[in-house]
Image (tube, grey):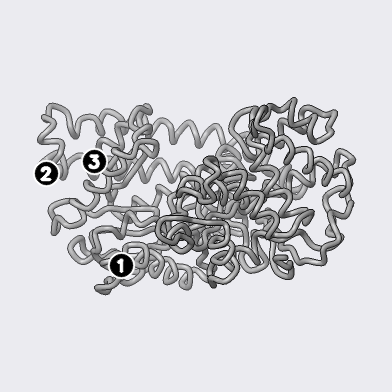
Amino acid sequence: MERNECHSATNEYPHPFICQVKLTRAQRIRGIILGSILFPLRVTLAALFFIIMWPFARLRLAGMSEEERSRPIKGWRQWLLHPILWSLSRAAFMTLGFLRIRVKGCRADLKEAPVLVVAPHSSFLDMLVLLPTQLATVVSRSENASLPVIGALLEFNQAVLVSRKDPESRKKAVAQVTERLTSDGYWPQMLMFAEGTTTNGSALIKFKPGAFLAGVPVQPVLLRYPNKLNTVRWSYKGTTWLEALWHTTSQFYTNSTVEFLPVYKPSLEEKNDPNLYADNVQKLMAKALGVPATDYVMEGRVPVNQLGGLSFPLESPARETLSLLHRNGLGAHEVKAALDRMLDRCQSGAQGSKASAEELASILGLTDRPTALTICGLFSKDETVDLRQIYLTVAALSGSVSFKSLLHTGFTLFDRAGSGSLSAEELADLMGALLGSPQRHTAELYTQASIQGRLTEENLMRVLTTHPTYQRVVNEYMQPMEAGSQLPNGKAVNNNGNMHNGNGSLYKNKKFE
């Protein structure tokens, strides 16, 4: 039997972004035999159906002006071409092995629920949910519009296109979605995957607010794959989309269930707060699915947990760094000495805090350049890294200094003007270095810790150690690893007597002094 091995993110919740498919030898042999026959046959037939869709999709908007394209399609272009595309889409999914799509509940009328909110989002194969929703309009990345066939289908669908890299595009998309959802039936029903990215389905991650901005009723839609072999899902790490497609098409058939829950009508408070609205619908759907509702999100292609506006990587770069250092023979004493050299470099006005992979290897005492490159990659997108980020987050995890000393050092390193006060941007950089992940939403913390527009070290320390939310941040995410905790090579990290959870999040029992 095939297993999806999902790694734990914390003691409380499973990790939703990692799912590794593992097969027994018998299953692997069976998959190779069936896959070598079914995979090319099914993919070829599905591709053929998509190619046939292409001209029909283009025909729907052919000869129309930009003004006409900006309005809902009516007339023969709707009643003739829509059923053709629906039938071809159903045929494509049947060839891929989705012989039956079981539907539970009833899809709400357009005016009753202008938007359908679907979860969990497992893979590109989730687009089969468009069939029982009668090809409801979607929101898609603008880059997809240039893809062969896919671009034509998005045009046919009159999808809202958005570029995630362009703030103006996002604003325009929000305005378009709001206009459609509040059109009182003028525009067709919309469908959105509220999680915004694919997961392994073990938990619902935090819903994006897009479907809830207009404050209109939504209909939650659950998408399940009730099979003995879970082959459809792929996410951040583990099974790739190509492997998911191979495993799925290697089965004789794949079951899928689409369940329409009752329409959710927002309260006045939820209408005024889209994030609250999204969180409440997420909890409702999680309960129906029997999985946890979490604050996990994908931020900058990195899975994080959110608390008080701060983001915490589910996979700690500091923990991985310490693991790499220990694999290269550095014990606790050598790690402390390396951190001291790193701090000296950061405090040096001549050289500054930026370092290349070669310089990092020298500071850490490594003879293995690939290891230094790997560590650079944990904190940076190129082969240079800000040593302040490595020092602060690794020092916190290693327990080589107290939290008070660490905060003082970090405050000094990021106080560029030497004024004894941090700007909002400098605070974001400091918290990013302490937590090992870029921080984009530190406005709340800045407000809490500022007095008359000044954020001093004393006030920041006070808020981080007394405010209920941020005290939890310090207690859970800025503490050393467990005493004698074992790294992959079996070496102990430190002897601080603290607890540590499964993903590198750190918590409890470290004195601030």
Q: Secondary structure at mark 3?
A: loop
- Going from N to C along the chain, the mark reached first, 2 or 3, is 2
- Going from N to C along the chain, the mark reached first, 2 or 1, is 2
CA gap between label 1 and label 3 equals: 24 Å
Quarter containing the C terminus: bottom right
CA gap between label 2 and label 3 equals: 12 Å
Q: Which mark is residue 280?
A: none
Q: Which residue sits at x=30%, y=67%?
A: 106
The image quarter in which residue 100 lies: bottom left
Q: Which residue sits at x=61%, y=52%?
A: 435
Q: Nearer the viewer, residue 78 or 414?
A: 414
Residue that badge 3 annotates: 158
Q: Which residue sits at x=63%, y=69%?
A: 12
Residue 26 in view here? yes
Crowd rating for badge 2 (residues with CA inside 10 Å; few <14, some 14–19, many 20+): few
The reply to whether discs 2 and 1 touch (Cβ–Cβ < 8 Å) is: no
Q: Nearer the viewer, mark 2 or mark 3?
A: 3
Residue that badge 2 annotates: 74
Q: Secondary structure at mark 1?
A: loop
Residue that badge 1 annotates: 106
Depicted 64 relative to depicted 490: above or below = above
Residue 360 coordinates in the image, percent (x, y): 74, 31
CA gap between label 2 and label 1 equals: 25 Å
Q: Amino acid at mark 1?
A: Cys
Residue 305 coordinates in the image, percent (x, y): 55, 57
Q: Nearer the viewer, residue 276 or 336?
A: 336
Residue 157 coordinates in the image, percent (x, y): 26, 41
Q: Secondary structure at mark 2?
A: loop
The image quarter in which residue 69 lies: top left
